[in-house]
Image (cartoon, helix red, strand yellow):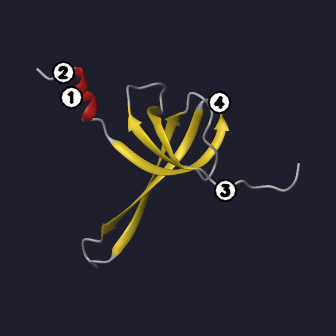
Amino acid sequence: MTSPSERRSQRKVRSGVVVSDKMDKTIVVEVTRTVIHPVYKKYVRRRKRFMVHDEENRCRIGDEVMIVETRPLSRQKNWRVRKVLREAPMRGGAT
C-alpha cells in the first residue's frame, strides 16, 4: 500500500498562463505543449484550458502559474494553483 505522501507526489503538474480571472476563486489557465505531427513530422502546438481553483484570488491575467491535479472541486474544476511562477507586468495607466 502506498502512503498518502507517495500518492501526492504522483499528481499531475502543469504550468501555463492565466487567460481569465473573472470568476471568484477560479481562474482559467491555458497550457501549451508541442507535439510532432504523425504524418508531416513538424512540431505542432496543442493547447488546453483548465479551470483552476485560486483560493486567495491572487492570480491575474498573464501570470504564469504551476497547477496541480486535485479532487473534484466542482463540475469542471479539479486543478488548483500550486504557485505563481511569474507575475504579469502591471498594465494600465496612472490611477
Q: What element carries label 3?
A: loop
Q: Mark 4 points at which residue?
A: 24
Give neighbour class at mark 1: few <14, some 14-19, many 20+ (Cα, 10 Å): few
- Please tell me which residue lies in front, 72 or 60: 60
Give neighbour class at mark 3: few <14, some 14-19, many 20+ (Cα, 10 Å): few
- Foreground disc of the pair 4, 2: 2
Q: Is mark 2 on a helix, strand or loop?
A: loop
Q: Position of residue 6 (x, y in %)?
A: 21, 28
Give yes or no for contact between labels 4 and 2 (Cβ–Cβ under 8 Å).
Answer: no
- Please tell me which residue lies in front, 7 or 39: 7
Vertical placement of 6 versus 88: above or below?
above
Give yes or no for contact between labels 1 and 3 (Cβ–Cβ under 8 Å).
Answer: no
Q: Mark 1 points at which residue?
A: 6
Q: Residue at x 24, y 71 (%)?
A: 38
- Foreground disc of the pair 4, 3: 3
Spatial CA distance of label 2 from label 3 is: 41 Å
- Quarter in which the N terminus is drawn: top left
Q: Mark 3 points at which residue?
A: 89
Give yes or no for contact between labels 1 and 4 (Cβ–Cβ under 8 Å).
Answer: no
Spatial CA distance of label 1 from label 3 is: 37 Å
Q: As shown in the figure, which amino acid type bears the numbered disc 2?
A: Ser
Spatial CA distance of label 4 from label 2 is: 34 Å
- Please tell me which residue lies in front, 58 or 22: 58
Q: Name the residue under label 2.
A: 3
Left or right of 30? Residue 19 is: right
Q: As shown in the figure, which amino acid type bears the numbered disc 3?
A: Pro
Q: As shown in the figure, which amino acid type bears the numbered disc 4?
A: Asp
- Foreground disc of the pair 1, 4: 1
Sooner in the amino-acid sequence: mark 2 or mark 3: 2
Q: Residue at x 49, y 25 (%)?
A: 74
